[in-house]
Image: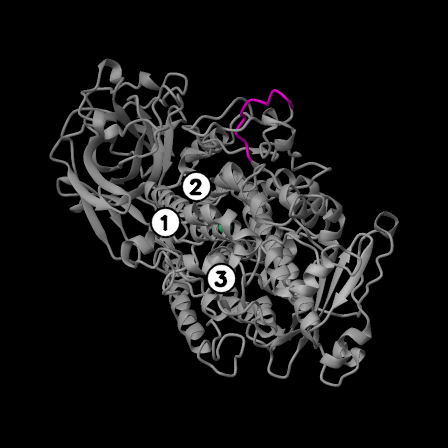
């Protein structure tokens, strides 16, 4: 057991071993030697033996052994009891100085660092070492003295990615039998928070802190930072166990009161803050979460209820941000990037807004004038910086679409390699069958008949086409039909429940061959054009499908399946997995920035009258799409890439294939590239999990892990908590599958959905996010207008110029990589595994695999056989290339859900 460290004395030699930690299951091997006049820690890990000198008996001072009272942390005493067994440990404490632009935060603490400590150590930063060993007399952890961090002007300064790193030397006094330092406690007696980057003891024992330390007046509990090394709960050095549990209790909080910016409490709540009923009934929105409107939970903020609805939480004022635990906050550089993006968006929307009234309902094509380097006659074609400010970069699909509306080949290609490649399914019965309840929705019999498709399936019978896996469907019938009466009652928002049939051609491309457009009381089918009239009916049908697809992409695949479903997993991880837990360490970079990104989404995107409601056809009913998909369709066990492909019938299990599945559409760029990445993630996780968990007992007895997973299900997804489909967590294989799925979701899957928005979805005439008119029937007063000028009718059904401009602006902000993005395969800090060469090797291998995948994707993009990603006018499929620079690049897979 780890805590039974033997004391070995080698009397008579120059070098005396006082303590050896080599029983630490091939982890960090630290030995404390007495050599000549020095005590030394030696690290005999794979990096080679290093020794660090500790001056012996420099001062006759003994450390205090009492554990600090939490209630009176400032009562820390620096005992100066003479002792002959005292040694000094020198530590480098690194603090980050930042230029904090967030006005809600206190001033940079460095500005007050020169103020000398007041009496009783108030106005000081005090640190204390905690040993991994217990004092046999008190059975409490052995402690060093409390040492005060001085701020000498001649300290070392290095520039870091988020500000200067200021290193200060402090000295701890410990007894010679102190053992290995396992934790450092920190009390901030100043009035401002500061960012503690790291603490290094004698350049050998490392504490990677990376956290804001709040003033003692705001957070009376001292902060604890643990040694940078992974321990399963049962392996925790005995002297650290209490601290490990206490730290998690602090992070869980008591579920009461309003959270303030300095808190670091992770807790759950329902989505009851999207509306603002005090502003009027038109701003009221239902609570999401619970039986009526099922939804995953969010981070609790505890703001006061609204006056109008006691169950609704009040909105934040414009000057404040929604609470997120302090270390979930974005770095300044990310805030600045978003701010710049918003400013650009504002400027680029000025002229379209002004022109909207002049251009009328047909103005959407004027958007071409606001896209760079296109039209020399453009009144804004002035080039240079002005153009850069007022014009959009061309979206990836723009050059192909600028002269035409969406063509069939591109429409088919986009469901495999466009903005949303997650909805296409193989058709197993024709016509498709609705799962809705006919007693509520009336006859649900499809209007699609054999006659609609028989001429487009290469001479096959429908049955033959089904059996040969040639028919595919984009089925938005059931998710839209229940909402259509409400949506179509909105001003200038019109939708159908669409069902689109595709045929897989011999070239491996998908050809759209029929679209059913259903309303609650009628249905019709449009097919590819045979004359001018049918050409525009078909074009309108495709536009309605695109609008439905855009909303589904955003509200179900992007928001629900990624952002909303992963937030409670992150909350549960912080509440139940210690920072020392190996699974926490593995997941940590995959949780970065997500809770803040979701808070921003609640502030401005999915809130009442937010941009989601204004951009998509369902308007104020948009979130109902999310709710129904979550209630009727979402399953965590279907979220890995292979499971998702099999569920949609696009792949079948095949053990002979490298990834265990065979694609039924071979040239399916998202799936083909995704499987490479999925496979690498799975391999890495397998190596990692198998290193720490040797069998089922270790999984079942890991109470932190079990608590994490249980709470993710029970409090994160309460509506589904009793579902039988939740994967079990009983074996290492179960854990591998769960963790690989999570990493896949937050990396490649999110990157594809998020950073492809602008390149693949921003050009509105090509892919409208909303529709304003239904297709006229012969008895409608609009019908003559349509017959006289079907193109104008079509254009007037699309969003207006200003709507198009706002949509482009939003996507340009959301699709941009921040300069501080951290990409998959680029793990910044591997110091936790310096004693674990197998883990380091696995991470390095994963990194190399990401580079190889990048090359493979580039090769695929120039393979003329792959017609969905290579060919004249075809955009190469780059969205799953792992690396990227900053900005809207249409590629790059961040480690986490950062936007
Ligand atoms: Fe996102």
Quick one: 805 or 119, which is closer to the camera? 805
Report how far apart the C-alphas of labels 1 and 3 lie in the structure.
Answer: 20 Å
Segment tinted magenta in the rendering: 299-309
Q: Pointer 3: what residue?
A: 681
State the residue at coordinates (56%, 76%). 667
Determine contact: label 1, label 3, CB under 8 Å.
no
Could you tell whether 295 is left or right of 183 in the image?
Answer: right
Residue 832 is labelled as: 1
Categorize mark 2 by other alpha carbons within 10 Å: few (<14), some (14-19), many (20+). Answer: many
Dividing the image into 4 quarters, which one contains the N terminus? top left
Report how far apart the C-alphas of labels 2 and 1 lie in the structure.
Answer: 11 Å
Secondary structure category for the residue under label 3: helix
State the residue at coordinates (65%, 70%). 650
Categorize mark 1 by other alpha carbons within 10 Å: few (<14), some (14-19), many (20+). Answer: many
Ranked by sequence position, the earlier of labels 2 and 1 is 2
Picture coordinates of residue 218, whole percent (x, y): 39, 21
In the picture as drawn, the residue positioned furthest to the bottom comes out as: 459
Secondary structure category for the residue under label 1: helix
Magenta stretch secondary structure, dominant: loop
Secondary structure category for the residue under label 2: loop
Q: Is residue 540 magenta?
A: no
Report how far apart the C-alphas of labels 2 and 3 lie in the structure.
Answer: 22 Å
Which mark is nearer the camera, 1 or 3? 3
Q: Pointer 2: what residue?
A: 579
Relative height, residue 363 to residue 575 (above, below): below
Could you tell whether 253 is left or right of 25 in the image?
Answer: right
């Amino acid at each position: 057991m780890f805590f039974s460290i033997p004391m070995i004395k080698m009397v008579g030699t120059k070098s005396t071993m006082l303590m050896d930690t080599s029983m630490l299951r091939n982890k960090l091997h630290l030995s404390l030697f007495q050599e000549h006049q020095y005590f030394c820690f030696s690290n005999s890990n794979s990096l080679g033996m290093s020794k660090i000198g500790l001056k012996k008996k420099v001062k006759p001072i003994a450390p205090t052994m009492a554990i600090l009272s939490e209630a009176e942390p400032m009562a820390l005493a620096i005992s100066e009891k003479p002792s002959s067994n005292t040694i000094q440990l020198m530590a480098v404490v690194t603090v980050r100085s930042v230029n904090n632009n967030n006005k809600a935060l206190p001033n940079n603490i460095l500005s007050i660092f020169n103020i000398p400590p007041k009496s009783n150590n108030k106005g000081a930063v005090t640190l204390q070492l905690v040993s991994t060993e217990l004092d046999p007399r008190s059975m409490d952890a052995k402690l060093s003295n409390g040492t005060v961090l001085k701020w000498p002007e001649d300290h070392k300064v290095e520039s870091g990615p988020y500000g200067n790193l200021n290193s200060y030397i402090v000295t701890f006094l410990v007894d010679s039998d102190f053992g290995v330092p396992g934790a450092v406690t920190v009390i901030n007696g100043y009035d401002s928070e500061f960012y503690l980057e790291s603490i290094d003891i004698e350049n050998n024992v490392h504490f990677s802190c990376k956290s804001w330390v709040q003033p003692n007046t705001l957070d009376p509990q001292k902060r604890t930072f643990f040694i940078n090394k992974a321990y399963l709960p049962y392996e925790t050095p005995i002297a650290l166990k209490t601290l490990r549990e206490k730290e998690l209790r602090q992070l869980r909080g008591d579920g009461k009161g309003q959270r303030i910016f300095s808190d670091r409490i992770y807790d759950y709540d329902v989505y009851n803050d999207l509306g603002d009923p005090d502003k009027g009934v038109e701003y009221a929105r239902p609570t999401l979460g619970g039986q009526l409107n099922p939804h995953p939970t969010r981070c609790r903020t505890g703001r006061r209820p609204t006056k109008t609805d006691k169950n609704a939480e009040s909105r934040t004022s414009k000057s404040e941000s929604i609470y997120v635990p302090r270390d979930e906050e974005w770095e300044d550089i990310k805030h600045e990037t978003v701010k710049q993006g918003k400013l650009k968006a504002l400027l680029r929307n000025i002229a379209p807004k002004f022109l909207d009234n002049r251009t009328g309902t047909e103005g959407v094509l004027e958007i071409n004038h606001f896209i760079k380097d296109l039209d020399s006659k453009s009144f804004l074609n002035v080039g240079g910086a002005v153009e850069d400010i007022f014009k959009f970069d061309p979206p990836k699909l723009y050059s192909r679409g600028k002269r035409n509306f969406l063509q069939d080949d591109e429409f088919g290609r986009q469901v495999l390699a466009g903005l949303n490649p997650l909805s296409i399914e193989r058709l197993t019965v024709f016509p498709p069958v609705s799962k809705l309840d006919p007693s509520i929705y009336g006859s649900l019999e499809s209007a699609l008949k054999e006659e609609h498709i028989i001429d487009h399936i290469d001479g096959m019978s429908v049955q033959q086409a089904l059996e040969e896996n040639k028919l595919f469907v984009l089925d938005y019938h059931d998710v839209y039909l229940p909402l259509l009466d409400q949506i179509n009652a909105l001003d200038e928002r019109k939708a159908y429940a669409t069902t689109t049939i595709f045929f897989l051609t011999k070239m491996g491309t998908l050809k759209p061959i029929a679209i059913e457009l259903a309303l609650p009381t009628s249905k019709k089918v449009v097919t590819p054009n045979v004359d001018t009239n049918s050409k525009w009916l078909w074009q309108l049908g495709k536009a309605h499908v695109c609008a439905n697809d855009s909303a589904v992409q955003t509200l179900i695949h992007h928001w629900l399946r990624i952002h909303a479903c992963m937030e409670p997993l992150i909350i549960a991880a912080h509440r139940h997995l210690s920072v020392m837990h190996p699974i926490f360490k593995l997941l940590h970079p995959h949780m970065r920035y997500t809770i803040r990104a979701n808070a921003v989404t609640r502030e401005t995107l999915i809130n009442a009258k937010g941009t989601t409601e204004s951009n998509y056809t369902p308007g104020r009913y948009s979130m109902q799409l999310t709710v129904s998909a979550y209630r009727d369709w979402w399953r965590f066990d279907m979220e890995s890439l292979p499971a998702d492909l099999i569920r949609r019938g696009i792949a079948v299990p095949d053990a002979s294939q490298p990834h265990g599945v065979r694609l039924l559409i071979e040239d399916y760029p998202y799936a083909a590239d995704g499987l490479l990445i999925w496979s690498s993630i799975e391999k890495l996780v397998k190596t990692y999990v198998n290193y720490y968990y040797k069998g089922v007992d270790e999984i079942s007895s890991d109470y932190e892990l079990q608590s994490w997973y249980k709470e993710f299900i029970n409090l994160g997804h309460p509506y589904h908590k009793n579902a039988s489909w939740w994967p079990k967590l009983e074996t290492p294989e179960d854990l591998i599958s769960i963790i690989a799925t999570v990493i896949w979701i937050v990396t490649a899957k999110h990157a594809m959905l998020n950073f492809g928005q602008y390149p693949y979805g921003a050009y509105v005439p090509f892919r409208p996010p909303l529709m304003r008119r239904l297709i006229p029937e012969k008895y409608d007063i609009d019908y003559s207008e349509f017959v006289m000028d079907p193109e104008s009718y079509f254009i007037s059904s699309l969003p207006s110029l200003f709507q198009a401009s706002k949509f482009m602006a939003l996507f340009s902000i959301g699709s941009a990589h921040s300069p501080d993005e951290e990409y998959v395969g680029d793990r910044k800090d591997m110091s936790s595994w310096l004693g674990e060469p197998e883990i380091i090797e696995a991470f390095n291998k994963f990194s190399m695999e990401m580079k190889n995948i990048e090359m493979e994707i580039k090769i695929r993009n120039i393979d003329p056989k792959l017609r969905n990603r290579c060919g004249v006018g075809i955009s190469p499929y780059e969205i799953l290339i792992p690396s990227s620079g900053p900005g809207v690049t249409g590629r790059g897979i961040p480690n986490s859900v950062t936007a």
